[in-house]
Image (cartoon, rainbow, N blue to C red):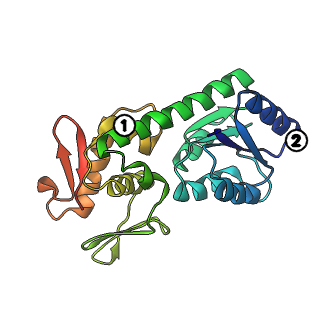
């Protein structure tokens, strides 16, 4: 099947240039000029990747990214004319996988698009090998409410409840427990978790995963030192048993 890319950009000249160059590389390109159209086309077309401008009329790129990340797992490459580091951090926290500052060369953009698509293929292959081919469906068909005894994960509200009481989780803590829970019973490597939850452009190491798992255990385990929900798999990483 042809790889589909959704390009969201309100500058007509840049939009046409992106569409032309991506099409020449063999991609099927869908375009949108504002945030609302981006959400509509993303839900209708289910692209393999989105190139998303930050400064959009109406709903900006940050909000579009935040909304889509709750519903889909396809990679998001954000474009911005801003150079401040805080904008990059906000974009990545919202769920973007990569960030490119304008002006940029088409060669660099193409390289990043190919790298993101290749990374997704590698992650899916890794998940398939660990789950005998059953994990890929979990990535694109989330169940709104995941229940594990007295623990509930509400994907629509981005809320975790223990004994019907909401827990105060940091954004990445929620992303981590959601990823683990979607793959209940599967031993996931630290590197795979890091790539899938933090994104392949994240500069940290697998120690980040250990720290966030410890924080989660302190909040959801009766005895964090004797975890029953998030188990350590020696030599691999972690397994969520619920």
- Residue 80 position within the rendered picture, expressed as x and y whole percent measured from the top left: 71, 39
Between 204 and 180, the residue placed more toward the observer is: 180
Q: Which mark is residue 12?
A: 2
Q: Residues within 10 Å of mark 2 (few under 14, many from 20)?
A: few
Residue at 44 percent across and 33 percent down: it is 122
Q: Which mark is residue 126?
A: 1
Q: Residue furthest left?
A: 226
Callout 2: helix, strand or loop? helix
Between 216 and 40, the residue placed more toward the observer is: 40
Residue at 71 percent across and 60 percent down: it is 40
| Nearer-N-terminus badge (2/1) | 2
Residue at 17 percent across and 57 percent down: it is 224
Between 27 and 163, the residue placed more toward the observer is: 27
Give the vertical position of 81 relative to 176 (above or below): above
- Residue 195 position within the rendered picture, expressed as x and y whole percent measured from the top left: 42, 38
Q: Is residue 228 left or right of residue 197?
A: left
How far apart marks 2 and 1 lie (CA) works out to 39 Å
- Residue 147 position within the rendered picture, expressed as x and y whole percent measured from the top left: 32, 70
Q: Residue furthest bottom?
A: 164
> Is residue 200 something one can see in this rendering?
no
Tell me the quadrant of the picture where the N terminus can be found. top right
> Is residue 107 something one can see in this rendering?
yes
Task: Please name which of the two marks, 2 or 1, marks the residue nearer to the observer.
Answer: 1
Between 136 and 70, the residue placed more toward the observer is: 136
Residue at 63 percent across and 47 percent down: it is 47
């Amino acid at each position: 099947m042809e790889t589909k890319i959704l390009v969201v950009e309100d500058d007509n000249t840049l939009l046409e240039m992106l569409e032309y160059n991506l099409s020449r590389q063999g991609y099927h390109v869908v375009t949108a000029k504002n945030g609302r159209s981006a959400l509509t086309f993303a839900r209708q077309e289910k692209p393999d990747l989105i190139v998303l401008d930050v400064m959009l009329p109406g709903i900006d790129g940050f909000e579009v990214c935040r909304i889509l990340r709750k519903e889909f797992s396809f990679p998001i490459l954000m474009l911005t004319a801003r150079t401040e580091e805080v904008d990059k951090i906000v974009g990545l926290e919202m769920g973007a996988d990569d960030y490119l500052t304008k002006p940029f060369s088409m060669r660099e953009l193409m390289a990043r698009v190919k790298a993101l698509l290749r990374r997704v293929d590698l992650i899916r292959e890794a998940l398939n090998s660990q789950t005998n081919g059953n994990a890929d469906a979990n990535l694109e068909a989330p169940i709104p409410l995941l229940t594990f005894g007295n623990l509930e994960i509400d994907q629509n509200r981005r809320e975790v409840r223990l004994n019907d009481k909401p827990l105060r989780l940091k954004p990445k803590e929620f992303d981590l427990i959601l990823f683990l829970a979607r793959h209940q019973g599967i031993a996931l490597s630290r590197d795979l978790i890091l790539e899938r939850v933090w994104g392949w452009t994240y500069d940290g190491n697998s120690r980040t995963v250990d720290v966030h798992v410890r924080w989660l255990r302190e909040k959801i385990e009766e005895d964090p030192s004797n975890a029953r929900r998030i188990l350590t798999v020696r030599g691999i990483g972690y397994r969520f048993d619920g």
